[in-house]
Each structure stands twice: as structure tokens, then as C-alpha cells.
Amino acid sequence: MAHASCPNGHDMWNGDGTPVVWAYRVGYFREYMEAVPECILDDDWQIYDCTEYEPGEDLDCWYCEKCKGLVVYVDIARLDYKRIPYDPVHAKIDQFKTWEDFIALRDREFEAFQEFYQGKSPLEAIEQYPFKYRYKVSPDLRVIFAFNKKGYLSFGYERSNWTEFSPSAEMYLTAGNTKVPYNPYRWAVGKMDIEVRIGWYAHLKDKRTIQIESIIQNGKEYRGRDINLEDKPFIVIAHSDILSISECDTNT
Ligand SMILES: [Zn+2]
């Protein structure tokens, strides 16, 4: 059980499953069926077993009931999305052929899907189930569109921030006066790392926030401005000084 803040700052708690969204990229299952053509879903092999620990596919999605915002944790990244309503529009799902297909279900809808997919392959389950919406994600991951059963655009999301956490990031759990350090991304050490990008904000382990101006040596050293000091002086920072990097200047 855990808490997380939504893209608009609301507190979400997943203890009762309320914000939990099960989301899967359909293309992954097409590849998966080629690798494991005999795969059948049953009590011993659930759909989430197919993506567990799979880089880029094991999505941890949270939905905020207050503002309908979305937070997606994947690998060492957190992507924040804000809901955008659309007036009735005639955009159709088949106009977005170059975008990735996704399916998604709220936790409370998941049990019915589980019952449906017993004895089916993961791809049959995804293609045959009457999902309320089918989703398309833009290649740059900036936009998510939801299409209704007739294939028309119903609503969407725009990315409001993207954060990546250093595998060496040490964070703290607080319980009363006690602070317990933990390393949530320790599993990623040596496997993946943050990618520092020009214009993004580096949140340093010593709490400073530096906007990156140039990359001196990729993965080693960067030049940027301390945004909280008058005149925003230039400083040089080391890759190992960075706790996280984000697209926008928000505290993470
Ligand atoms: Zn919210």
C-alpha cells in the first residue's frame, strides 16, 4: 500500500484499489504470442504475469478520482498526465494508425476481465473483450486518446511532466519522528539510468534544483543554472549528484 500525489497535487492511496488502473500495450502481446504461442491465461498464469519485470511494459498506473489525472510509473520514470475534455469530435480511432494501442481497466473492472479471459490466449482476451474504451498513445508519449466502442474520440490526456529517478536515489519513509531510508530503484542499478536532457531540471541530492544548459560529458558531467539563487549562477554538476530529473520544475 502506498500514497502518491496526482498531477494536480491530490493525494491518492492504493490500499483499497481505488486509483489502480491495469494498462497494457497491445503490441507487446503481439510480440509475446510469437515468443510464447502456447500461452493460455488461467488461475496459474494471469495477464500481469506476462509483463512482470518486462522493461517498459510493467506499468503501474494511478487514476485520480478528484481531477481524473493519471500517473504512470514505468521502470525508473514517472509520467504525469492531465485530463483534457473534448467537445463532440469526429476523430476516429483508425486515423491514428501510427500510435500505439493500449487497453486499460480500473481495478474494480478487472475481475470481470479475468473471468472472461480464462482459457484464452492474452491476445484473444485483449482483442475480444468489450472494453469501454480503447486507447491510443502518441509516439512521443505526450498524448493519450480514449475512443469509445464506436471508435470515436471521447476524451484524452496530455503529459504535464516526466520525471526519471536515479537508480541510486535514496528516499525516506516517515513514521512519526522516525525517518527510514530506502532505495526504491535499487533494482535498476547497472540496468538503466536517467538520461539528462537540455532544458530539464535536475533535482540534486543536496536539494538544489539545476536547469540543464549543456551536457559536458553524457552520463558524467553537466552545466546548468541554480534556479533558486539570484542571477541563477552557472555551476557544473556530476551525474552522481542527481537524485531525479524532470521536464518541469516541480518537487518530486
Ligand atoms: Zn487529482
Image: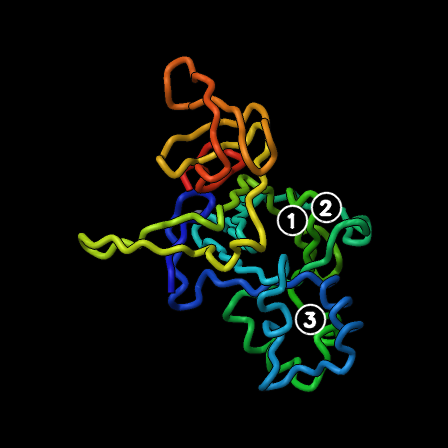
- Residue type pointed to by label 1: Ile
Q: Nearer the viewer, mark 2 or mark 3?
A: 2
Upstream in sequence: badge 2 or badge 3: 3
- What residue sits 54% from the left and 39% below the top? 160
Mark 2 Cα shell of 10 Å, populated few (<14), some (14-19), many (≥20): few
**Disc 1 to disc 3, how far (Cα)?**
20 Å
Q: Is mark 3 within 8 Å of ligand 1?
A: no
Helix, strand or loop status at disc 1 = strand
* Residue furthest out toward the left: 177
- Dividing the picture into quadrants, the one containing residue 115 is bottom right
Mark 3 Cα shell of 10 Å, populated few (<14), some (14-19), many (≥20): few
**Disc 1 to disc 2, how far (Cα)?**
10 Å
Q: Quadrant of the C terminus?
A: top left
Q: Which mark is residue 35?
A: none
- Dividing the picture into quadrants, the one containing residue 43 is bottom right
- Name the residue tied to disc 2: 139
- What residue sits 37% from the left and 15% below the top? 230
- Which sits in the foreground, 15 or 166? 166
- Name the residue tied to disc 1: 144
**Disc 2 to disc 3, how far (Cα)?**
25 Å
Helix, strand or loop status at disc 2 = loop
- Which sits in the foreground, 100 or 96? 100
Q: Nearer the viewer, mark 1 or mark 3?
A: 1
- Residue type pointed to by label 2: Pro
Q: Nearer the viewer, mark 1 or mark 2?
A: 2
Residue 218 rendering spot, x and y as whole percentages: 61, 35
- What residue sits 56% from the left and 47% below the top? 193
Upstream in sequence: badge 1 or badge 2: 2
- Name the residue tied to disc 3: 130
Q: Please state if 21 lies on the left or on the right of 233 as rendered.
A: right
Mark 1 Cα shell of 10 Å, populated few (<14), some (14-19), many (≥20): many
